[in-house]
Image (cartoon, rainbow, N blue to C red):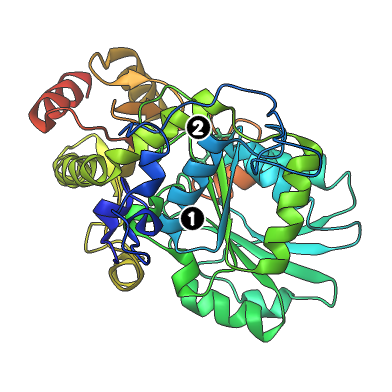
Amino acid sequence: MSFSIETKCLHLEEDSQNNDGQPACRENCNHYGSISFPIYQTATYAHPGVGKSTGFDYSRLQNPTREQLEKIVCQLEGGTDAFALSSGMAAITLLMELFKPGDHLIVDSDLYGGTIRLFDNVSSKNGIQFTRANCSGDDVESIITPATKAIYVETPTNPMMNVTDIAAMAKIAHAHKLLLIVDNTFMSPYFQNPLALGADVVVHSGTKFLAGHNDTLAGFIITKNSEINERLRFLIKTTGSGLAPFDSWLVLRGIKTLGIRMEKAQSNADKIARWLKTQKVVTKVIYPGLEEHPGHKIMQGQSRGFGSMVTFRLSSTEKALSILEKVRLIKYAESLGGVETLITYPTTQTHADVPEELRLKNGITPETLRLSVGIENVEDLIADLKQAL
Ligand SMILES: *Cc1c(COP(=O)(O)O)cnc(C)c1O
């Protein structure tokens, strides 16, 4: 049976396969019919005999709960394997282990601040070289060198919401035998599937929309390249940053409602973006769902939605700071993608470690705020913003 994206959040297609005349969902029957996948809180597994294995040996290598989560995420992104890591940064750090000293990567200049910090302070020290480019506008092809191994983008970017045409970028990457890596955190697999558009590797901060409740950290890598899959299995086993069983279960549970959360949050974000545009103290609203957004058309072609992240600028720094002080229902906090609406000050929070010159060049001015719109009643959210503005 082939499922639509909403159903894929809850059920594995492979469980419903019925080749031998047996009832469907044999997988669940193995767990006493438990509808909720069990938490296998174990570090190790007894072997049935010498040279025999249940398929599980030690939880650093694999754990049934983590494996179930990896299967669900793999199915959602249309990969051939997925890896659940202890955070988004653990996923990106593991991914960097695919490269060796001297390798060169072209990376978007507007990325999550922690990713820039990793590249600048850890990966560079390990001999990997980076060139920043505005991947939604610059001529990326002209900066490819013989040492270039990959192009790394987010689309839309955090927080400026720049949109890269994934299929066009994949074409450039493959013409030069490079990998295209896409951080798909902002869209989640519910709205966008980069592998289907030609990307080679997808990464996620599972902490955000996938887990969805601001209560756990997680990260994912998904690919459909068997050589990379094999190397990543070796790396996860060797470096030990796989997601713990209980956290895996929390993310599994979160993903069950991914579809309805994404739809509701997006509908709220669209209304808030349009309302913000009518406010005198707001000088700019950046939301790809707005027709005037430069990436609007590209996203209509490559995504099933525009998401729920809204970046906006105020008339002054003082105004921006006073909004952070005055919001009540909306919480002044880092992170995004959860059911609660959060407001962030990228200058001192998510992007504090990005060099100031780069920050300003990317448009992250001190008047800029970022909203991660949640699933509350939209009138309540607008009322809170109204009193804060
Ligand atoms: C949060 C985030 C990360 C890092 O993920 P953690 O789970 O916080 O480690 C990476 N990329 C993007 C786009 C993010 O928003």
**298 or 361, which is in the foreground?**
298
| The quarter of the picture showing ligand 1 | top right
Q: Which residue is mark 2?
A: 248
Position above or below: 141 against 361: below
Which image quadrant: the C terminus?
top left
- Distance CA(mark 1)–CA(mark 2): 14 Å
| Residue type at the position of mark 1 | Cys
Q: Residue furthest bottom?
A: 175
* Mark 2 residue CB less than 8 A from any atom of ligand 1: no
Q: Residue at x 24, y 39 (%)?
A: 261
Regarding residue 22, the answer to whether it shows in the image is: yes
* Front-lying residue, 229 or 114: 229
Instruction: Look at the numbered disc 1 and give the secondary structure of its residue.
Output: helix
Amino acid type, label 2: Ser
Displayed quadrant of residue 345: top left
Q: Position of residue 223 (x, y in %)?
A: 58, 62
Q: Which mark is residue 239?
A: none
Q: Is residue 325 left or right of residue 144?
A: left
Image location of residue 171, percent across then percent down = 57, 82
Does ligand 1 reach within 8 Å of label 1's beta carbon?
A: no
Identify residue for label 1: 74
SS category of the residue bearing label 2? helix
Q: Residue at x 64, y 74 (%)?
A: 140
Q: Is residue 102 above or below residue 313?
A: below
Is any part of residue 356 visible from this angle?
no
Q: Nearer the viewer, residue 327 or 169?
A: 169
